[in-house]
């Protein structure tokens, strides 16, 4: 009986280890500058203790906000993360008007807009390399993809060409995220994201549990249609704000089901127990 209990506990331990959030997203906000160096050190220590190996920073520039630049609070915090052994995937530039803009544009306008944003992000990548001088394992493009604005097949083809051209100019793998709004069939959506992954991009599909725009069974059908090369982001929050209101959310337990053949990540640090200092009233 004791041997059976030992084996059971061993398997439980292995299961918990396998589900550890090895990749964790962090979305910088200006309010995070209020944290001191000791608070950041503890956050990164606790992240490592909880199994995190890679930190995916959603952006390092958001409109006019550069979070202190090469010698500011964000860069200093990320250096501390490296001291705790965390690998870094650094986010590039995010246009605060991204979503309203793509809502208004036709296909030609969307292509032009994306090309301009990719140019801005490439300049950002060069600046991060030259000025921040942080070792990185990848670059993250903050502009999320969805199946409403890329419902048209030609738009998806144009985007894939643009992303491949952009990725070729980088010195580390390109990461980007997508979410489903129920406009493309799961199989078509999976094929689209799979094509991007086959082109050498690290594509992350958001499971949508936090926003809950789709019913759980529908979300599961999208997840099951994803090829193995597409990673899954488990949302560790529940949105409490209504449509048209400023985004608000509360912490929630992310989906702990095994991801199978998919790489997995958790969004985000702010909603994890050890990230409580980042949550402002």
Image (cartoon, helix red, strand yellow):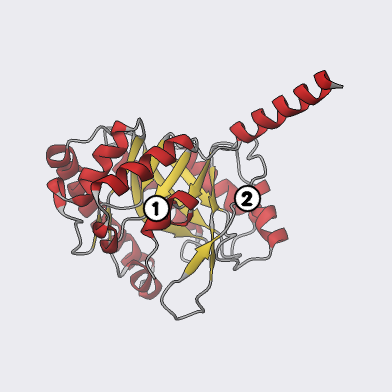
Nearest the camera: 197 or 209?
A: 209
The Cα–Cα distance between marks 1 and 2, rounded to whole angstroms, is 30 Å
- Residue 250 on image: x %, y %: 51, 65
- Residue 15 on image: x %, y %: 67, 32
The residue carrying mark 1 is 159
**Secondary structure state at the residue bearing disc 2:** loop
Would residue 200 be seen by someone viewing this image from the given angle?
no
Tell whether 90 sits left or right of 127. Answer: right
Q: Residue at x 39, y 43 (%)?
A: 175
- Residue 246 on image: x %, y %: 41, 76
**Secondary structure state at the residue bearing disc 1:** helix
Q: Residue at x 67, y 44 (%)?
A: 257
Of the residues under marks 1 and 2, which one precedes in the sequence?
A: 1
Q: Give the position of the N terminus as an image quadrant.
A: top right
Nearer the camera: disc 1 or disc 2:
2
The residue carrying mark 2 is 255
Tell whether 105 sits left or right of 213. Answer: left
- Residue 145 on image: x %, y %: 45, 57
């Amino acid at each position: 009986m004791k041997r059976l209990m030992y084996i059971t506990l061993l398997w439980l331990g292995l299961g918990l280890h396998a589900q550890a959030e090895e990749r964790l997203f962090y979305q910088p906000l200006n309010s995070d500058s209020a944290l001191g160096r000791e608070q950041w050190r503890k956050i990164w220590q606790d992240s490592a203790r909880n199994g995190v190996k890679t930190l995916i920073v959603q952006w390092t520039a958001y409109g006019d906000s550069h979070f202190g630049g090469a010698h500011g609070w964000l860069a200093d915090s990320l250096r501390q993360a490296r001291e705790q052994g965390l690998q870094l995937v650094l986010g590039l530039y995010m246009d605060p008007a991204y979503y309203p803009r793509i809502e208004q544009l036709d296909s030609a306008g969307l292509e032009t807009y994306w090309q301009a944003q990719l140019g801005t992000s490439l300049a950002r990548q060069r600046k991060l390399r030259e000025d921040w001088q942080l070792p990185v394992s990848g670059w993250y493009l903050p502009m999320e993809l969805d199946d409403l604005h890329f419902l048209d097949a030609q738009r998806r083809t144009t985007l894939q060409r643009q992303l491949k051209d952009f990725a070729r100019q980088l010195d580390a793998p390109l990461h980007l995220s997508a979410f489903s709004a129920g406009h493309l069939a799961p199989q078509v959506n999976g094929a689209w994201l799979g094509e991007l992954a086959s082109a050498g991009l690290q594509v992350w599909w958001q499971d949508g549990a936090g926003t809950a725009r789709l019913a759980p069974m529908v979300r599961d059908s999208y997840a099951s249609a994803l090829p193995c090369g597409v990673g899954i982001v488990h949302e560790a929050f529940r949105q409490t704000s209504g449509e048209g209101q400023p985004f608000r959310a509360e912490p929630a337990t992310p989906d702990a089901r095994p991801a199978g053949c998919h790489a997995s990540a958790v969004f985000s640090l702010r909603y994890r127990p050890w990230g409580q200092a980042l949550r402002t009233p």
